Image (tube, grey):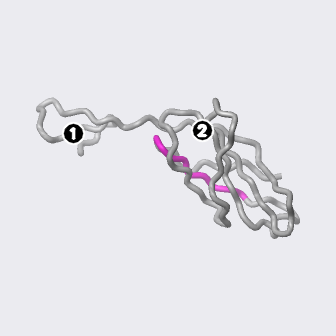
Amino acid sequence: MLLPPVILEVTDKSVKLSISPPAGALANKVLKYVIKYRMVADSAWKSTPEESTLSRTVDGLDAASLYEFKAVAKYEGETETSESVPIQVKTGESKLLFPSSDCSHHWIQARGSVA
């Protein structure tokens, strides 16, 4: 069985994940990996392109939304795939910009840094 992906980084619009290769005899037969994802409220899964890399960033997500992610391994010479159980991740809040109190061209980010 394939382990769920590990979350490496979460922003307001993306999630970076790492896939752990399967253990045992199938480990050497993995040809490609896919990350399937969806908003928790949705029924249909979307997929990243098939790649051999173990790290993936899923972009274009909605801010402050709950998503499910699962890893899928596709094996060389096999029609079967292995899927992990899904994990849930909430994307971050959008970083809104507010004008500073002196109304100049300086902007203050919601997290407190000055741009």
Where residue 55 sits, quadrant-wise, is bottom right
- Nearer to me, 74 or 88: 74
Circle 2 is placed at which residue position?
A: 89
Q: Amino acid at mark 1?
A: Trp
Mark 1 = which residue? 107
**Bounds of the magenta span?**
12-20
Residue at 64%, 37% in the rendered image = 88
Q: Please rate how many residues cluster around mark 2, counting C-alpha atoms within 10 Å: few if below 14, some from 14 to 19, many from 20.
A: some
Residue 18 highlighted magenta (yes or no): yes
Decide if residue 115 is on the left or right side of residue 62: left
Q: Position of residue 57 (x, y in %)?
A: 55, 54
Q: Amino acid at mark 2?
A: Val
Q: CA distance from mark 1 to mark 2?
A: 30 Å
Above or below 98: residue 33: below
Query: Residue drawn at (67%, 66%), measured in percent from left and top?
Result: 52
Residue pictured at 61% horizontal, 37% vertical: 67
Q: Which mark is residue 33?
A: none
Residue 2 falls within the magenta-colored stretch: no
Quarter of the rendering occupied by the C terminus: top left
114, above or below 18, in the image: above
Disc 1 + disc 2, Cβ < 8 Å:
no
Q: Position of residue 37 (x, y in %)?
A: 64, 44
